[in-house]
Amino acid sequence: MVSAIFEQIVNGIVSGSVYAIVAVGMTMIFGVLRAINFAHGEYYMLGTFGAWFAIEYFDLPYPVAIVIGVVATAVIAVVVGQFVMQRIVGAPPETGVLATLGIALVLQNTVILVFGGGYKFFSGGYIEPVSIFGFTLAEQRVLIIIVCILVFVGLELMVTYSRMGKAMRAVSQNIECCAVVGIDVPQVALRTFILGACLAALSGVLTAPVNVSVYGGMGEIITFKTLPVIIMGGLGNVRGTFFAAMILGIAESLVATYVGLQFRDTVGFATLMLVLMWRPHGLFSAQARF
Amino acid sequence: MMHKLDRRAFCFAMGLIGLGVGSVDVWAQDATIRLGIVAPMSGPNARYGSFSLRGAQLAIEEINNAGGVVGRKIAINSGDSQGTPVEGVSATRRLIDLDKVDFIIGDVSSSVTLAMQPVAEDAGVLLLNAASSNPKITYAAGVGGFKWTFRNYPTDENRALIVIQYAAEKRGFTKFAVLSVDTDYGRAAVDFTKKYLPGLKGTILTEDYYKEGEVDFRSVLAKIRDSGAQAIIMYGNADTTPIIGRQMIEVGLAGKVPLIGNAEFNTESTIKAAPKALEGAVEAAAWLPAWDAPKSLAFVEKFKAKYRETPNNHAYVHWETVHLLAKAIEAAGSADRAKVRDALSKIKYDSAMGEVTFDDHNQARLPMILLQIENGKPAIKGAYAAEIKYPAK
């Protein structure tokens, strides 16, 4: 019994890690652009497609495919960032919603147009099970947890100490003041956006081996899973996102086991409602910044 | 003045043309038996529609080349349902009112067929379905209501019963776990399984339904592993099977607890994704090109020679159903609708899958092919029939 619960908690941490890597990009983009990026799941999809393309068409090994997936997404993010995302800075809130929803449709349908709407089979990755603490786990999932920890430590350091991180924090607090002191706001916005998109792509490539199927519409479900995470974590809060993602992952895993798989997707939004009633600024915000 | 005259002349001319067409119609009806085929010829299921029509056309060609039935040839009128009930109903109306068809075969999609049933009933035109699997269609036919609906295709209930019967009797399973898709299809298949489970001394230990697009099954698979179930009943989407297969390997279910049901366990790419998990999986199919019966193999050869592609299930069932209808017309001795209907309910027809007879709900008693994955390849374990228990009125 105890070991069964422990196994489910580890399962939850794995799915939490996936949510965390995707959500942290989304929350940083929100912090800087003040726009929920509804196309975020699409970068997750693009990363996966990039890696799938590299493996399927060029027979490249999986580690190389990871790099290709992320770089391909970065290139697309530069284009989208310059033409669309930079213009959202300072625009009315509905601009961000419409623009990102539009981008989501364009990206999704372009991929379907180019590669077809059918499901593709992702053959790369390390799927052999390994035994840890008496139960088995695919090697890939261990990799996901390790990468998640590295990403968050890296981001924490970057946001706290680097020039770029400081600029990001400044922009998320007050755009006008940043302009006054000479911070290039559109540049910061663009870089944050590219970083966020790359993280989503990385998460996509890392989960592809265990999720097996690759298809144009796969990003949508990710966008809707990460929304509750970033709101629970406190919009724009990197550390909060990490814990919120873990809570959601573990709660989902326990509900799927002890209540029923069909109730799994309700967990995110049910928790979200509770959080909004009890702590409307998120679980981990010391105070509201806006 | 000139304008008015024009219009009058136009109406007059149209009337004449109409009369002309009408009289041609009557003449044509005497010469040929008109068969309407309603199928999705456009839209997302257009591939199924094209296979259906080709199968029917091949059968018509064979029948007409052999001299037709009761001395008359059969002609096909095709209607496009686009896979939607609304278009299916208007296509059916057009076939009945304009083309004056005597018989209709259609549609592939269950929801379209359900909408066509009352239309055919009102017009007193025989609707012979060849490819819809929803049990409701024949629950509401024969003694259940619609006198003009017949179905020559196994239902989801047949499938559920055949699979669970095989699992219980041939494999000796008694403890099952359910992991199906959370749709009408997935839930209904499990409900039908439950209907027959007590008779097979089987019990369900855990029951879970996944949302379409779900990718994480580890928790539920671990629960199934710990529950001691001997097989997983899965009615789901083809696209989810590889994911579940891979995660079964991860949690240590693969090779111990097989999947039974229907979710394209037998496709090559699925088996390749998780060979160990799919080993021993059991699935039922209405027909397969590889089905080893002389009549079936001859059909596959003929179809390939004519259309240069391997026929699918829809091509076969339409080909067979047209032949079945021709046999019924022959047995009735004329193309009179009521006589053909009565002949159909009493028919004994030798199909490539075995003998076809209809029960009192106008549902064909049809065997399904049972597949089991052995050594990474689907192996045909024979054809099994199942009698449906209708609820007492």
Image (spheres, helix red, strand yellow):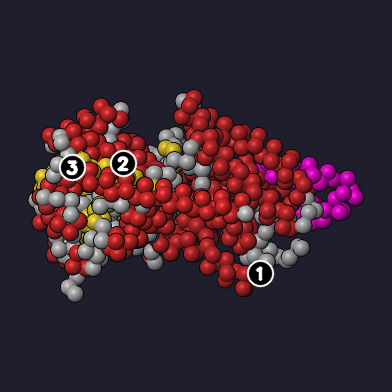
Residue sitting at 35 percent across and 40 percent down?
Answer: B50
Report whether mark 2 lies on the same chain as mark 1. Answer: no
> Label 2 vs label 1: CA separation?
59 Å
Residue sitting at 30 percent across and 28 percent down?
Answer: B308
Q: According to the image, label 3 marks what residue?
A: B72
Image coordinates of residue B80 in percent, x first then y, are: 39, 47
Q: Given the image, on which type of amino acid does mark 2 rest?
A: Leu
Q: Chain of mark 2?
A: B
Label 1 crowding class (10 Å Cα cut-off): few <14, some 14-19, many 20+?
A: some
Q: Quadrant of residue B54?
A: top left
**Part of the protein shown in magenta:** A169-195
Q: Given the image, on which type of amino acid does mark 3 rest?
A: Arg
Kindly give the residue lying farthest to the right in the view shown. A180
Q: According to the image, label 2 marks what residue?
A: B53
Asked if residue B303 lies left or right of residue A48, the reply is left
* Residue B24 visible in rendering: yes
Q: Secondary structure at mark 1?
A: loop
- The C terminus of chain A appears in which quarter of the rendering? bottom right
Q: According to the image, label 1 marks what residue?
A: A280
- The N terminus of chain A appears in which quarter of the rendering? bottom left
Image coordinates of residue A58 in percent, x first then y, are: 49, 25
Residue sitting at 57 percent across and 69 percent down?
Answer: A273
Q: Given the image, on which type of amino acid does mark 1 rest?
A: Pro
> Label 3 vs label 2: CA separation?
21 Å
Asked if residue A61 lies left or right of residue B1, the reply is left
Are the residues at dot 3 and dot 2 in contact (C-beta closer than 8 Å)? no
Q: Chain of mark 1?
A: A
Rendered view: B382 above or below B174: above
Image coordinates of residue A231 in percent, x first then y, are: 63, 61
